Amino acid sequence: MNIHEYQAKALLRKYGVAVPQGRVAFDAQEAADAARALGGPVWVVKSQIHAGGRGAGRFSNDPDGKGGVRVVKSVDDVRENARKMLSSVLVTKQTGPAGKEVKRLYIEEGCDIARELYLGMLVDRASSRITIMASTEGGMEIEEVAHRTPEKILKVAIDPATGLQPFHTRQIAFGLGLSGKQVGAASKFIAALYQAFVDLDASVVEVNPLVVTGSGDVIALDAKLNFDDNALYRHPDIEALRDEAEEDPAEIEAAKHGLNYVKLDGNIGCMVNGAGLAMATMDIIKLYGGEPANFLDVGGGATQERVATAFKLILRDPKVRGILVNIFGGIMRCDVIAQGVVAAAREIDLHVPLVVRLAGTNVDAGREILRTSGLAIIPAENLADAADKIVSAVAVGESK
């Protein structure tokens, strides 16, 4: 689960992480009032959307070409920029060409920036440890830094048996080229951020940029917090911060039915049981020249109703030109999947090719249900056969 920048900073502030003062605003007058309350002479007007690259982004209807993060020097300018930004669509590298509508702003006090750094924390699946990443290249996307100058990224893995130790924070501070009182300020900052990461069951914490001010303070100028969905039951206060307007409606609907669904940009819908098999299915579709339209895992204990719901979700996407159902029946029985597919296909006008590959428990019964359904279902013997057939069927449909 993601939250907005202002929400992340409010959480981090409770742990002693140094962040600038700011206030959220939902209209231009609130923005101006926030600026007055914060005091001047410089403010930053920040678009609040669930996407990075806001500063370099562009508004589709704003001819002045300014980005989604603007530095202004008067209350009137705060009001005017807020008026232009709110209800406008901001397009960034992470939103895609469709962009996201800005429905709220964060008005923040200005900051005397001497240096911009990068600091992040995540769970490294390979080592099963929280890993701290730091770089002197603040303000840039860490993926770009990793690609162009990987030697500028410092990584420190924390042993869960000991937790974060003072030598860890000093190693990072020295690696960032800090000295004097900056080392103490950075150590305090890193320790507070680590504690927040652990206590809140975060999956990612990213501070970019982490700035050193002219007076030597270390402050989070931006903050991104992602949480482990599986741990949200422990944090109802965090779950309450969810902004469903920033999420795909189909993904929200899927979550309500216990489905793992992520919309992609392709035209071949996928329904699979098991995350690993779903990834393999998407990979083989691409191998055969197609593009997956979604990731959809119905899970190991899906019911006929859940399968039917999954089928409907896939068909809601207007880009879908074909569907591949790939089921390995272990806990999930193939006949249950087949019944769900048939029920959904009969309820909805199935106007695209449907390829189904079944294997495992009750596979013969499942194939018989599909064969006698009276529907135009294309059977597949194995995964390669399924990918070949659905890519070919979509290509034929596109050529008509």
Image: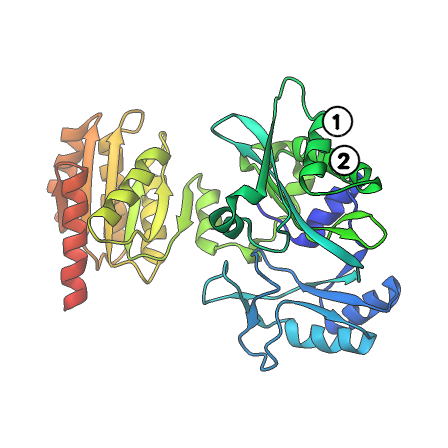
Task: Identify residue for label 1.
Answer: 166
Q: Quadrant of residue 261?
A: top left
Circle 2 packing at 10 Å, graded few (<14), some (14-19), many (20+), is many
The answer to whether residue 107 of the structure is visible from this angle is yes
Taking the image as shown, residue 316 lies to the left or right of residue 151, namely left
Report if the CB atoms under discs 1 and 2 are less than 8 Å apart.
yes
Instruction: Judge by depth and name the residue closer to the eye, 63 or 89.
Output: 63
- Residue at horizontal 55%, vertical 79%? 61
* Residue 186: mark: none
- Residue at horizontal 48%, vertical 55%? 248
Q: Tell me the quarter of the image containing the N terminus.
A: top right
Residue 360 x %, y %:
21, 27
- In the orientation shown, which residue stands out farthest toward the top? 161
Instruction: Judge by depth and name the residue closer to the eye, 112 or 227.
Output: 112
Instruction: Judge by depth and name the residue closer to the eye, 232 or 288.
Output: 288
Circle 1 packing at 10 Å, graded few (<14), some (14-19), many (20+), is few
The answer to whether residue 372 of the structure is visible from this angle is no
Residue 200 x %, y %:
67, 35
Q: Secondary structure at mark 1?
A: helix
